[in-house]
């Protein structure tokens, strides 16, 4: 079995800016700079032969490259139930189009459709019992964060290796946009 997801990665300077947002929130487990990405579709555990089918289906996707802008910060959950801090993404029809094509390709491979609505974001930190006042300060201090536009010329199939120190992501293949 292999644990997979499809995502957009970012240039080193953008990852550095995102990583620079970290800090000031007790109970936050910050995402390592090399692991910062925008998930188009989490796949999960699949057999190796299904992974080959997924690769072939993703390779057939034809979509144009586009510019992407990261815009603002927010969180999922509220108060003591806050669970994720994220950087947002400026609305992009091209991004939504690409995500829809990825979803269709994966469903054609036999995967169940994603039930959640696509909500593009970059996970900055996972939270556990973070103080509400510190979360509010984080959001206030970093609310005007903006990065880009950056050119998106490919998307990537990743393998996720789970370990004691957190997940390690391995890029398996990049698929060009053009």
Image: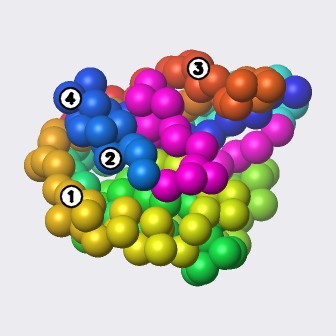
Q: On the picture, is 19 further left or further right than 143?
A: right
Q: Earlier in the sequence, mark 3 or mark 4?
A: 4
Number of the front mark, 3 or 4 = 4
Q: Earlier in the sequence, mark 1 or mark 2?
A: 2
x 36%, y 68%: residue? 137
What is the spatial separation of the Cα atoms under label 3 and label 4, in whole angstroms?
A: 20 Å
Q: How far apart are the two marked residues, 1 and 2, measured between alpha carbons?
A: 9 Å
| Neighbourhood count class around disc 2 (C-alpha, 10 Å): few under 14, some 14–19, many 20 upward | some
Whichever of callouts 4 and 1 sits on the residue coming sooner in the sequence is 4
Q: Tell us which disc is closer to us: 3 or 1.
A: 1
In depth, the one of 26 and 71 nearer the eye is 26
Mark 3 or 2, nearer chain start = 2
Which of discs 1 and 2 lies nearer the camera? The answer is: 2
Q: Choose mark 4 or mark 1, whichever is in front.
A: 1
The reply to whether dot 1 and dot 2 touch (C-beta < 8 Å) is yes
In the structure shown, which secondary structural element does the residue marked by tag 2 occupy? loop
Where does label 1 land, which residue? 145
Closer to the observer: label 3 or label 2? 2
* Disc 3 to disc 1, C-alpha distance: 28 Å
| Spatial separation of the CA atoms under disc 2 and disc 4 | 13 Å
Asked whether 132 or 89 is in front, the reply is 132
Q: Which residue is mark 2?
A: 21
Q: Nearer the viewer, residue 129 or 54?
A: 129
Pinpoint residue 160: horizontal percent, then vertical percent: 68, 29
Q: Which residue is mark 4?
A: 13
Q: Nearer the viewer, residue 89 or 78?
A: 78
Q: Which contiguous range is marked in magenta?
A: 25-45
């Amino acid at each position: 079995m292999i644990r997979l997801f499809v995502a957009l990665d970012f240039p080193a300077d953008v990852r550095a800016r995102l990583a620079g947002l970290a800090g000031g929130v007790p109970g936050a487990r910050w995402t390592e700079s090399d692991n910062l990405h925008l998930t188009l579709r989490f796949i999960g555990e699949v057999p190796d032969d299904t992974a080959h089918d997924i690769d072939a289906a993703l390779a057939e996707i034809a979509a144009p490259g586009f510019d992407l802008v990261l815009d603002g910060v927010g969180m999922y959950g509220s108060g003591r139930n806050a669970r994720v801090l994220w950087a947002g993404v400026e609305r992009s029809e091209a991004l939504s189009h690409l995500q829809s094509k990825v979803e269709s390709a994966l469903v054609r491979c036999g995967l169940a459709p994603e039930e959640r609505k696509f909500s593009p974001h970059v996970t900055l930190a996972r939270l556990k019992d973070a103080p509400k006042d510190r979360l509010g300060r984080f959001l206030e201090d970093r609310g005007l964060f903006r990065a880009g536009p950056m050119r998106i010329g490919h998307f990537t199939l990743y393998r996720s290796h789970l370990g004691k120190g957190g997940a390690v992501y391995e890029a398996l293949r990049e698929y060009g946009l053009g």
